Image (spheres, rainbow, N blue to C red):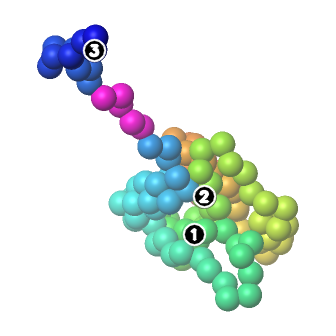
Amino acid sequence: MAIMKTLSDITAPATVTRKLLEKDVQKQCVDWARARGYWARKFSSMTSTAEPDYLFAKSDWGVIGDVKFACEFKAPGKTSTDAQIEEQGIMRLAGWYVFECDSFNKFKQIVHAYEREQQP
C-alpha cells in the first residue's frame, strides 16, 4: 500500500548557484574601472582571436595615457591560451601593461598596485 505524502513532507528545493562566467567577471571589472574614471574599450580584431578583451586608460596627473593597460578576462580558474600569452608578450614589448584576470577582487588589487607604481 502506497503512503500518501502531505504538505508537511515537502522540502524546500535545493538552492541553485550559477557558476560565474567570463562575461560576469568582465562586466563587474569594467563597470568598476569606468566608475573610477577609466576609458575602457572592448578590443577585438577581425584577423585574430588572441588579443586581450579590454583596453583601459586614465589620466589623473594631467598627462594623457599616464595609466594604460590591457586585460584578458577569464572565468574563475581559467587561464589564457598559448596564442593569448604570445599576444600579451607582444603588447608588453610595445609598452602596454597586460594581465589576465579571473576575479573582481584580483582585478582591483592589480589595478590599485599598478596605479601606485605610475604615480609621479
What residue do we see at 69% from left, 56% from top?
99
Q: Is residue 59 left or right of residue 10?
A: right
Q: Position of residue 30 (x, y in %)?
A: 46, 61
The image's mark for residue 73 is 2
The image's mark for residue 54 is 1
In reply to whether residue 51 is colored magenta, the answer given is: no
Determine if residue 46 is in view. Answer: yes
Is tag 1's residue or tag 3's residue first in the polypeptide sequence? 3
Q: Position of residue 55 (x, y in %)?
A: 58, 71
Marks 2,1: beta carbons within 8 A: yes
The quarter holding residue 85 reads: bottom right
Pair 1/3: label in front: 3
What residue do we see at 54% from left, 75% from top?
42
The quarter holding residue 109 reads: top right
- The stretch of residues the image draws in magenta is 13-17
Which residue position is annotated with label 3?
A: 2
Pair 2/3: label in front: 3
Give the Cα separation between the discs numbered 2 and 3. Answer: 54 Å
